[in-house]
Image: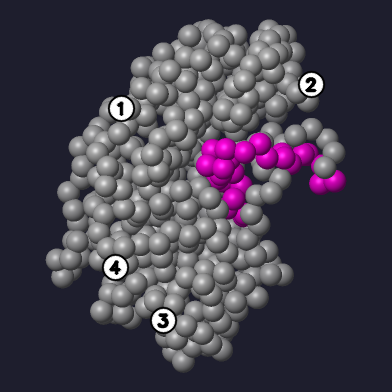
Amino acid sequence: MLSDGMATENHEKASKPLLADSEGQTLSANPWRPIHYLGSKLRLIYPITSILDELDPERGAVCDLFAGSGTVASSLSQTRSVVASDIQEFARTICAALLETSPIADGSDQVLANAREIHRRISRQLGPLVELETEAIRSAEHDPELLCNIVDDGSLLSDEMGNANNSLAKAKKDVLKRIRQSDSGDILIATRFYGGLYFAYDQALWLDAVSEALNRAIPSLRTIGYGAVLSTASEIVNTVGKQFAQPIRPRTKDGEIKSHLIRQMVRDRTISVSSSFDKWFARYLSVPRVNSHLVVRGDYKYVLQNHCSEVSVVYADPPYTRDHYSRFYHVLETLCLRDTPQITTTMLNGTGSISRGIYRNDRHQSPFCIKSQAPDAFRDLFSGVSSLDIPLICSYSPFVSNGHPRLMTVEAIVDLAKIYFDKVEVRFAEGVTHSKLNKSELEMETGKNAEVFIVCR
């Protein structure tokens, strides 16, 4: 059985020194990525802050309207009050862990102590599969066949659809029987949906055990703890680029094993969840809690109408390609909601086998990512901010021939903005490129001018 102590990364608890802007004002405790996030604005924090201060030198409250992984909101929280909003629960969870006041000492030790007891109890149901994967990892260097079988056919959901066979199928059949006969089904969310596929079985068990321990903890501890759970999941996930858009494919279309991926598969699947959680918990806890903030889960139109009456300026970073970003974070969404969602199938009419990525059927489809809806989405954004009589900074990436096509050109967006604002200008963020997935056909943004700011006032 794999030991959770088999960590492949150092356990660091040291807090980071503060950074300051050009006027010596504290910005944040070394801005960092809570999760691997597509289109992260981590490298744009300084130009964003500079333009915000130009538009609103009194540093009133700011609304980060599409807050995502919270890097911008967290940085701005050191000098302004922030309304951080997003339509997805995983984003709200991360932002709450970064922004909400949490007058607690480091409680990760107690959470992990409770999680160990829960893990001991629920791991009985997964024994056959954990033992099988332990054997697969140990033999992977000279015989990776079994490990590849687990990644290809290891999902407990795929067994329910009758897609597996041989020793792996027997182990899954045994495990499913044990789960049905136990009272642990409601706890085993990560395990039942993503074990074997995105995470090692024992890693998934630990994610479930820590989550259950947090559910029994005090609210302030739970807030930071769930942020640490998501960061841990993002760190340990066994995929190309550490994203959740699709599981790793260990074989070619011809069935040949991709030998160059085996070492990564072993490395990812032996990262200690408890050590990772402890590290991330300390990092969230180290973020200075200053000013008062509001974290909201909601549609951008709803947030502008209901939570921005005291906001002085808005920063908006809507999605701008055909790729629905929710596909990259559906696992994190389920880990937050702790529900049992309906899963999409290979056929649009709901028939066929379940999707290999185990995608939620209800995952959010942003209007900014739909060509026919994008113009109206921008109109609603501009109209909503204009009605508040405050300025807006909108991040956007120009169309680039070697990247994914944007649904609207910058010129078209500027023309829409001019309907609602007296002055609209475009500023370039020189030399900035976004986080990309480590696969050429999935690269999202490239080029020198990968980002512009559309400044409206």
What residue is pinned by disc 4?
A: 80
Q: Residues within 10 Å of mark 1 (few under 14, many from 20)?
A: few
Looking at the image, is mark 4 or mark 1 earlier in the sequence? 4
In the structure shown, which secondary structural element does the residue marked by tag 2 occupy? loop
Question: Residue 19's quadrant in the figure?
Answer: bottom left
Q: Residue at x 54, y 79 (%)?
A: 384
Q: Which mark is residue 109?
A: 1
Looking at the image, is mark 3 or mark 2 earlier in the sequence? 2
Residue 243 vs residue 341, the one in the foreground: 341
Looking at the image, is mark 2 or mark 4 earlier in the sequence? 4
Please, what is the three-letter code of the amino acid marked with disc 3? Pro
Mark 4, mark 1: which one is toward the viewer? 1
Do the numbered discs 2 and 4 sit on residues whose CB atoms are within 8 Å?
no
Q: Which mark is residue 373?
A: none
Please, what is the three-letter code of the amino acid marked with disc 1? Asp
Would you say residue 402 is visible in this rendering? no
Mark 1, mark 3: which one is toward the viewer? 1
Q: Position of residue 212 (x, y in %)?
A: 49, 30
Magenta stretch, residue numbers: 323-349
Q: Which mark is residue 162?
A: 2
Mark 2, mark 4: which one is toward the viewer? 4
Residue 209 vs residue 197, the one in the foreground: 209
Mark pair 4, 1: CA separation: 32 Å
Q: Residue at x 61, y 29 (%)?
A: 186
What residue is pinned by disc 3?
A: 391
In the structure shown, which secondary structural element does the residue marked by tag 3 occupy? loop
Q: Is residue 157 magenta?
A: no
Question: Residue 109's quadrant in the figure?
Answer: top left
Looking at the image, is mark 4 or mark 3 earlier in the sequence? 4
Q: Residues within 10 Å of mark 3 (few under 14, many from 20)?
A: many
